[in-house]
Amino acid sequence: MIELTVYSRDGCHLCELMLEEIARLYGARVRVTVLDVDSRDDWRQLYGLKVPVLSHMDREICFGRLDTAAMRAVLTA
C-alpha cells in the first residue's frame, strides 16, 4: 500500500475533488492522510495558496489538481 499525504484546507473544493479522484482511481492501493495546512504556521507558509498538495514520502507529487501521470510514476516505483 502506498502512503500519501494531502495538505488541505477546510472548505476547499479543489481539496475535496482531489481526494474523491484519488479514492475513485486508486482505491485500496493507497492510504491517504489529510493534513490541515492552517494547523501549523510552517505548512501554511509552505503550501498556503497551493492547496491541495499531494505528497509521497515528503516529496511533492502535484498540487491544485491530481496529476495522474505523476501518480502512475509513484505507483510503479
Image: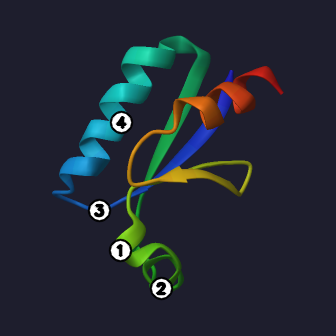
Q: Spatial distance from mark 1 to mark 3, Cα to Cα?
A: 10 Å
Q: Amino acid at mark 2?
A: Gln
Quick check: 4 left or right of 9?
Answer: right
Residue in the image at 58% along x and 24% along y: 30
Quick check: 54 left or right of 69?
Answer: left
Q: Spatial distance from mark 1 to mark 2, Cα to Cα?
A: 9 Å
Indicate the secondary structure of the residue bearing disc 1: helix
- Residue 77 coordinates in the image, percent (x, y): 83, 27
Q: Of the numbered discs in the image, which one, if any, rests on residue 65?
A: none
Indicate the secondary structure of the residue bearing disc 3: loop
- Residue 11 coordinates in the image, percent (x, y): 16, 57
Residue in the image at 53% along x and 30% along y: 68
Q: Residues within 10 Å of mark 2 (few under 14, many from 20)?
A: few
Q: Amino acid at mark 1?
A: Leu
Q: Which residue is mark 1?
A: 49
Is residue 42 placed above or below 24 in the rendered structure?
below
Q: Spatial distance from mark 2 to mark 3, Cα to Cα?
A: 13 Å
Q: Residues within 10 Å of mark 3 (few under 14, many from 20)?
A: many
Indicate the secondary structure of the residue bearing disc 4: helix
Nearest-to-viewer mark from 4 and 1: 1
Q: Which residue is mark 4?
A: 19
- Residue 42 coordinates in the image, percent (x, y): 53, 84
